Image (tube, grey):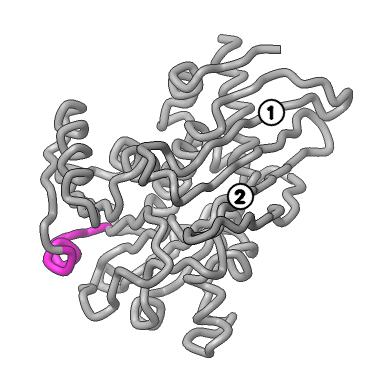
Amino acid sequence: MKVLSLNETRAALPFDQLIAALDAGFRTDCTAPLRHHHFMKTHGQPDDVLLLMPAWRDEGWGGIKLVNVHPGNSAKGLRAISSTYVLFERETGQHRLILDGGELTARRTAAASALAAKRLARPDSSRLLIVGAGRVGANIPQAYRAALPIEKVDVWSRTEASAHKLVEELRAQGFDASPAPDLETAVGNADVISCATLAREPILKGSWLKPGQHVDLIGSFTPEMREADDMVLRRARVFIDTEHAKVESGDIKTPLDTGVITETDIISTLAHLCRTDEYPRTSADEITLFKGVGTAIEDLSAAILALKTLSE
């Protein structure tokens, strides 16, 4: 059994191949149960969360990801998410590969976001706004550059120092990147707005949006978390990664529960778009929204790609 470090996991998952692998993975029959959420109370802090995400195919491969989400870690100078992924042979159950789950998650999350944008955003979208300067947000520009003609990247974070740090990293990678001191102004300038935060209250307002934009919501993975207000949902044509988003994310579940949107307002899932090879944008002026909560299908597809990459 091979064990990959963070850097080895990163090298095994190049974004152009990863986006293609996720597209193919959504077209393949795969069982992915609703993830297990276990909430661990921490006095005086937000709940810590233990996530278990299994997926398997009838033949070939299966896998499971163990994720610990500890929001209070930021005050300790530690990452909020720790994770490990195990890939196993479906026929025998033998473990074949262990990957750094945090790096796999960050890269497959960014790749799924880019895959959705490739199908939903204007093809000429060139200016990207990253809201949140954490691990996933840092991967978004590279992933999007593999899917759209991104030329300019703006970064906004509640912590100014974090935004400046990410901007410097992006500049070192060859991006034309700048910190965005004012979120409303930055939203107005963007073609694509990608939110990758742990926000529990909306930080993106629908009144800021302009025609033709694509909104990408990554952060909310529990019903108590939310990045976009009701007007964002009302103004956009809404797409989700899988049906699980309707119950797992506050960005979709809360508007459904309160009647802000209905089931019929959710146009399709990314899985369906891939299986039918659809590009459903109807005009250059419409606003599209993609809400991804992440799915074990993506994890499994990424792990299979990593094993293939190592074998070449």
Q: What is the magenta segment's predominant secondary structure?
A: helix
Mark 2 or mark 1: which is in front?
A: 1
Q: Is residue 311 left or right of residue 210?
A: right
Residue 241 is drawn in which quadrant? bottom right
Determine whether 69 is above or below 304 in the image.
below
Residue furthest toward the bottom? 259
N-terminal label among 2 and 1: 1
Q: Is residue 35 left or right of residue 143?
A: right
Q: Residue at x 50, y 36 (%)?
A: 20
**181 vs 139, nearest the viewer:** 181
Residue that mark 2 sits on:
295
Determine whether 125 is above or below 67 in the image.
below
Q: Is residue 98 left or right of residue 116?
A: right
Count of residue discs:
2
Look at the numbered discs 2 and 1 and tell me whether their residues touch, using CB distance below 8 Å: no
**238 vs 79, nearest the viewer:** 79
Mark 2 crowd level (few <14, some 14–19, many ≥20, 10 Å Cα): many
Q: Residue at x 56, y 32 (%)?
A: 101
Residue furthest toward the right? 92
Q: Position of residue 100 (x, y in %)?
A: 55, 27
Disc 1 residue type?
Answer: Val
Magenta stretch encompasses residue 285: no
Q: Is residue 27 visible?
A: yes
Magenta stretch encompasses residue 184: yes
Determine whether 53 is above or below 13 in the image.
below
Residue that mark 1 sits on:
86
Residues in magenta, as a range: 183-192
Quarter of the rendering occupied by the C terminus: top right
The residues tagged by marks 2 and 1 sit, at their Cα atoms, a distance apart of: 15 Å
Q: Secondary structure at mark 2?
A: loop
Q: Position of residue 246 (x, y in %)?
A: 60, 70
